[in-house]
Image (spheres, rainbow, N blue to C red):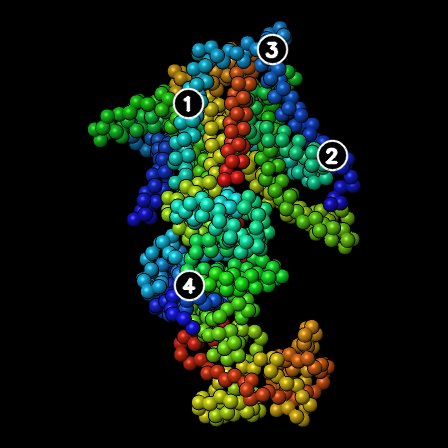
Amino acid sequence: MGRDLITLEHITKSYDGQTILDDLNLSIYENSFVTLLGPSGCGKTTTLRIIGGFEKPDTGRVIFDGKDITDLAPNKRQLNTVFQKYALFTHMNIYENIAFGLKIKNKSDSYIKDKIKYALKLVNLEGYENRMPDSLSGGQQQRIAIARAIVNEPKVLLLDEPLGALDLKMRQDMQYELKRLKEELGITFIYVTHDQEEALTMSDHIVVMNQGYIQQEGSPETIYNEPENAFVADFIGDSNIIRSTMIRDELVEILGAKFACVDKGFGENKPVDVVIRPEDVELVAPSEGTIEGVVTDLTFKGVHYEMDVEANGYEWLVHSTKLSEVGSKVGIKVDPFNIQIMNVPVSEDEEAISETV
Amino acid sequence: MKNIFKKIYLGILLLFMYAPIITLIVLSFNSSKSRAKWGGFTLNWYVRLFSDEAVASALINTFSIAVLATIFSTIIGTITCIAMIGLSPKLRSMIMGVTNIPMINADIVTGISLMLLFKFLHIGSGFSTILLAHITFDIPFVMLSVMPRIKNLNFYVYEAALDLGASPFYAFRKTMLPDIVPGIVSGALMAFTMSLDDFIITYFTKGSGFETLSTLIYNEVKRGIQPEIYALSAIIFVVVLTLLMIVYRVPNNKTKEK
Amino acid sequence: MKLFKNRQSAALMALPYILWAVVFIVVPLCMVIFYGITDDNGSFTMSNIATIAESGYFKALVKSVLLAVISTIICFLLAYPLGMILSSMKLKRNTYIVTLFILPMWMNFLLRTLTWMTLLEGKGVINTVLSFFGLPGINIINTSSAIVLGMVYNFLPFMILPIYNSLSKIDDNVINAARDLGAGTVQTFLKITLPLSAPGILSGITMVFIPALTTFAISTMLGGSKILLIGNIIEQQFTQAYNWHLGSGLSIVLMIFIFINMIIESMADKKGGQG
């Protein structure tokens, strides 16, 4: 994809005896849009703050462009941050806010003026120079925070849940806006969020974190379609996660019924976790299904129906465009390609993962 | 390294604040009347303080004025704040403007102005004049702590209660009053402590022969400090300390229970 | 907002206080002004106010302003670093420590001043301790220094509280943002922390400056009879000389100072708001 721009090596961090990050290793490629995704308290914000220089890791190194910057103060780093809740300087107008970093670098007035004009145009807020931050809406303030960061031409832009305080519509608009900005600027974005949809929409590369560990990293497609463990599967979208037994290669027993699958190499008669996405569950006539069940709940969701199907003691979540009435008997069928097999956690690290599921 | 400097600075300032008070407490047990010599431990000054009738009556005066002024100012202040909801913005800002005068003005001017009024109206100075003066300067403290609560009220809840069939008074009592109460309590506390601590306004409105704790101390000091005053300081300090600890304890316990 | 049937019923509820405020706030103030601009015969005169220009009175005014300014500056210099330290500490502990700093405020104002009389006297506690260690004694009781010390001791909590409040309201990320944009520690302080805490500084200044300017108890207790401040002179006009006209005239002068102070502050506040 590109060369490594930032490398985190064996990062450990704890507060008051509580471990936030445990031996974290992560490489971030140049010009990529990387998202650190996880629930609150998973260590994603701490990771970002360590890259930004606002926290020092207890152990480990931060390598930026080949140089060790672990002990470098934030004001000496070639990266800029867009903070949660914007963190604009409320006593300065928009012009002064955006000019802040440039003035410190002693840029000429004409350079600053041009830069601000360009930045405001980039975030679609031309002519806002003399407004005060308090007079802007949340979305506008967020754009100013981005403009304030990018005028300094950082190699990397760190974004700490920048859309968290915005309403849904504004959030969706800003997602496209950010993607466009990233393309136009051609720099690396490191984005922190707990919103999986945001991560899937914008990122080139997603790093799923929980309890201080990286659970899985990869492209949005890989993360969604091939979650490596129950935590990732559960966190990314709705899933049916069922403890099952791998009979042999390409055959798994789910809730007492045998399903064909495509995975190999899990051994024979070994416990596994099976992930099936709700849209991958097919409802057919009772006799044609692998398992028989009863529809217990039905909700119309616009593009599809959401149904709960009680079958062999498990409540299956099903998304389908075809309606099955509550109380009707149905058969459940799953295409072998849509059955994702995962190892049951055995190691201590993975145990931590399964606790939260 | 930085932390050590911070701690040293905190320590020096705390020493500056408390060393004088601690010295007074120590002196209150000193049997020698001289401040410079330690003549041995005694409770004599405390005994004399408690048998001093002037001190006893000043204490009673101080507390009864503080309690009455707090009650009246809290009632008037709260009612006025509630009435503000229905007033025109113009009248509202006029009332707040006048209310701010005693807060901004120097106490000496407020004291003098009230003294002139009482002399003009031929109201005999003493308990009643001090009480009227204290109510006057306490009301702004009550209003300033109740007003923010009033501004944050959610009127939809009140209307919802009406919609569900509550009478206006019942709806007010059940939906709005609970939100205002914390402001009333902190306003009343402020009023009480301001009244207890006041010297200047009391001094100008008290007339002769009537003393509160503050004016009594002022007179004593002019005549020369008696060690009983040290004993009094020590008692007041301990009482204030205990009261504050109780006040701070209560909300802490509540949050823990939650 | 249908709490009231109409504006009149709300006004009726506010009426008791409106009357109270007129009788006990507005009328008394008008009386001060009336006495200040009339003589014994009730005819108009500016001589009461003009008396401030006479050397004795003028000296007292200048001294009062000077001591109040010095005390305010000392309070600010002591309180600001303290506010920064307190607001940078972990949340759990700092409420207790902040309380420790404002607790002396709850003790009687005169007792607080009295402690310094005891400490500073010629044969007081400080000099006894100093001579015990063979050090030369200090002799500042009944001087301006003692008055300033008394003012600082009494009014310091009034400076600490608003400064601490405004500093602790500053979002950590705003400071981080300044660092992130390349500002060093000193630049961050001068361009971000200081201007953002300006409202707290301004209200601290008012809360120290006005009582310091108008005090008479502190100067009586710590300045002896040697030092007269404008507060002492006004007090004497009412309690000893019984010249209400002159006392009121001088009070008008004081109010003018308070008014000027307010205007300067509201101007500074606006300026701070606009950067």
Looking at the picture, tell me which residue is in the foreground, B64 or A242. A242
Q: Secondary structure at mark 1?
A: helix
Who comes first in sequence, dot 1 or dot 3?
A: 3
Q: Residue at x 68, y 47 (%)?
A: B176
The total of numbered circles placed on residues is: 4
Who comes first in sequence, dot 2 or dot 1?
A: 2
Q: Secondary structure at mark 2?
A: helix
Identity, as a three-letter code, of the amino acid under mark 1: Leu
Whether residue A69 is visible here, answered yes or no, is yes
Q: Residue at x 36, y 59 (%)?
A: A56
- Any mark on residue A161, and which? none
Q: Residues within 10 Å of mark 2 (few under 14, many from 20)?
A: many
Please name the residue that numbered disc 2 is placed on.
Answer: C11
Identity, as a three-letter code, of the amino acid under mark 2: Ala
Whole-angstrom CA distance, mark 2 to mark 4, is 59 Å
Query: Chain letter of disc 2?
Result: C
Please name the residue that numbered disc 1 is placed on.
Answer: C66
Asked if labels 2 and 4 share a chain, the reply is no
Q: Is residue B46 above or below residue A55?
A: above
- Any mark on residue C38, and which? 3
Q: Are marks 2 and 3 in contact (CB under 8 Å)?
A: no
Instruction: Judge depth for marks 2 and 3 and give the one in front.
Output: 3
Q: Secondary structure at mark 4?
A: helix
Residue C256 in the figure: left or right of residue A351 = right
Q: Residue at x 67, y 88 (%)?
A: A284
Q: Residues within 10 Å of mark 1 (few under 14, many from 20)?
A: some
Instruction: Judge depth for marks 1 and 3 and give the one in front.
Output: 1
- How far from the left and from the top, in percent, is residue A175? 56, 63
Please name the residue that numbered disc 4 is placed on.
Answer: A47
Whole-angstrom CA distance, mark 4 to mark 3, is 75 Å
